[in-house]
Image (cartoon, rainbow, N blue to C red):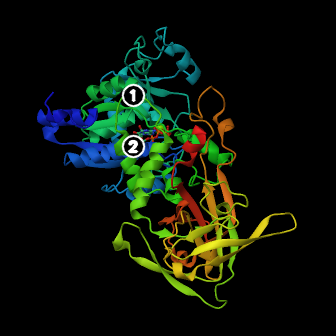
Amino acid sequence: MDEEIKKGHFIESIIQQDIKNNKNNGSVVTRFPPEPNGYLHIGHAKSICLNFNMAKKFNGKCNLRFDDSNPAKEKQVYIDSIKSTVNWLGFKFDTPLFASDYFDRLYAFAVELIKKDKAYVCSLSAEKIREYRGTLTEPGKNSPYRERSIQENLDLFRQMKNGEFGEGEHTLRAKIDMTSPNINLRDPIIYRVKKASHPRTRDKWCIYPMYDFTHCLSDSLEGITHSLCSLEFEDHRPLYDWIIDALETPCHPQQIEFARMNITYTVLSKRKLQRLVEENHVTGWDDPRLPTLEGMRRRGYTPEAITNFCDMIGVSKKDSRIDMGLLESCLRDDLNERAPRVMGVLKPLKVIIENYPDDRTEELIAKNHPQQEGMGSRTITFSKEIYVEQDDFMEDPPKKFFRLGPGREVRLRYAYLVTCKEVIKDESGTVTQLICTYDPATKGGNAPDGRKVKGTIHWVNANDCMDATVRLYDRLFKDENPEQDKQDFIENLNPDSLETLTSCKLEKSLITAEPEAAFQFERLGYFCLDSKDATKDTPVFNRTVTLRDAWAKLQKG
Ligand code: ATP
Ligand code: MG
């Protein structure tokens, strides 16, 4: 292979080589083909990025096509959600396409197959079909209906279409080879009777084409050049090619398989995600703990973090499970650039600054971003009563605890150096308040006498802050691979995946926060206003991700 072709992943190399050979006149057309039977998850993002990026890179186009040939499970809400999610990720598509728009043509293709004696109506029951199919080690047996005349097949197929038979009475099967080592080629069913109303074609059809028949022909009708799909379809490729070769189709797309994305501590399968939702282990499809793109969006993930992650993990033919830590680090890298800094106290401890004038409120200037001057600054206020984080105080702190403790001096971010003078407790011995003094000469945080104060902590003005609920999320599962060991994956759920803090105190500027917009709460992590549960009276913030990987540290012990 040429030097220049070695760059990029293997699919990119194949496409480059095809262009060089002027295959398909050098054009590239790809598609992302979701079945609208659920919401998209991060695994789908891999396929979306791959298909759209290959089209973009080679000046081609990528279709969004709904593979909607199974009316039993498909719904309009999924169609709407998928469209808006692909848009949100930043990919542009023409009018979405639907396999159901091709039902007439697919029917005509099926008739063509019958006329070529390459398909027949089979009247075996589902159970018998299974029995006749054989196993991985035994060949199958021909159906007794395999040698029906072409005319009889045409008549029966028309009757199937006209609703004259019940479900399961007859199927249309491709006539291939019942002894093939590839079970997919043992006369696969290509049409079945299904008396179900379709979200788009309503009651027009009572027979529906099977996935394998629909997919390759839809690809061909759209002039797809490279049909990229996940590895589980590798064994279906001979059938894909057989159908295209058997018919007069516009073109023969090339199916290329790649490994699905798997991520530690989560599950990526619509069926499993559905169980989590239906059994109320999570609050819905957009629960911020789920790997659904709607859930991740609500949690505060940015499209850039997700697409960067997909770029980073690349595309290969080898199955693997990617460390969730890598996804989170892509997220941190992106949020670090774009998130304005603010201060918020999650577990407040009241501090009274004894020597600060009672009625004074001071305005301090705080930078919105330490590196990005362009993000400007804002005014925050300081007064005699502030809140600090309970965790930033210890009554009997070890030497290296550079925060508050009796007699210890600490820097209040953007404000002054304060020293803890007295600790107030309630009857049960819980610390309820600290009495501190401040050094008026240290405005901005530096002591004129040059004394060193190592720790800096965040705070909010108790007289000028807002109350909020903050949700802290942790891994949804306890185990790296929740699906292993044949045990039910539900048993691996992390019971502590959500912690809700209801008495948080945040700086006032957050009153104008827009849902999903990222903020860094200094020292704590990245947060965004929840798009669903927050109201003007009770804002709810989601922790998108912590600043550092607290989990990895914990695991290392
Ligand atoms: P699930 O198993 O979650 O139900 P699916 O493959 O049935 O997923 P589809 O709607 O059929 O979902 O998928 C649309 C496209 O997304 C397909 O081309 C499929 O290969 C791809 N895809 C789905 N899951 C992943 C994944 N985890 N990694 C990469 N691609 C995926
Ligand atoms: Mg599927």
Q: What is the CA distance from the residue labelled 1 to the residue labelled 2? A: 14 Å
Give the vertical position of 296 relative to 383 (above or below): above
Residue type (three-letter) at the residue carrying disc 2: Lys
Q: Furthest residue to the top?
A: 138
Q: Position of residue 284 (x, y in %)?
A: 61, 53
Near-viewer residue (494 or 253): 494
**Residue at the limit of the structure toward the bottom, as seen here:** 359
Q: Residues within 10 Å of mark 1 (few under 14, many from 20)?
A: few
Q: Position of residue 7 (x, y in %)?
A: 21, 36
Q: Return the residue at label 2.
A: 46
Say which residue label 1 marks: 318
Q: Is residue 501 above or below residue 49?
A: below
Instruction: Write the residue at 13% across / 30% down.
Output: 2
Q: Give the residue type at disc 1.
A: Lys
Which part of the image, by quadrant, shows the N terminus?
top left
Mark 1 or mark 2: which comes first in sequence? 2
- Crowding near pointer 2: few (<14 within 10 Å), some, many (20+)? many
Q: Residue 242's quadrant in the figure?
A: top left
Residue at the image point whose x is 51% and y is 27% from the top: 170
Q: Secondary structure at mark 1?
A: loop
Task: Out of 12 and 225, give the one closest to the viewer.
Answer: 12
Asked whether residue 527 is in view, the answer is yes
Residue for point 70% across, 60% down: 394
What label does residue 98 carry, if any?
none
Res. 204 visible in picture: no
Q: Position of residue 315 (x, y in %)?
A: 34, 36
The quarter of the picture where residue 480 lies is top right
Q: Is residue 307 left or right of residue 401?
A: left
* Mark 2 Cβ and ligand 1 under 8 Å apart: yes
Q: Quadrant of residue 466?
A: bottom right
Q: Is residue 554 above or below residue 332?
A: above
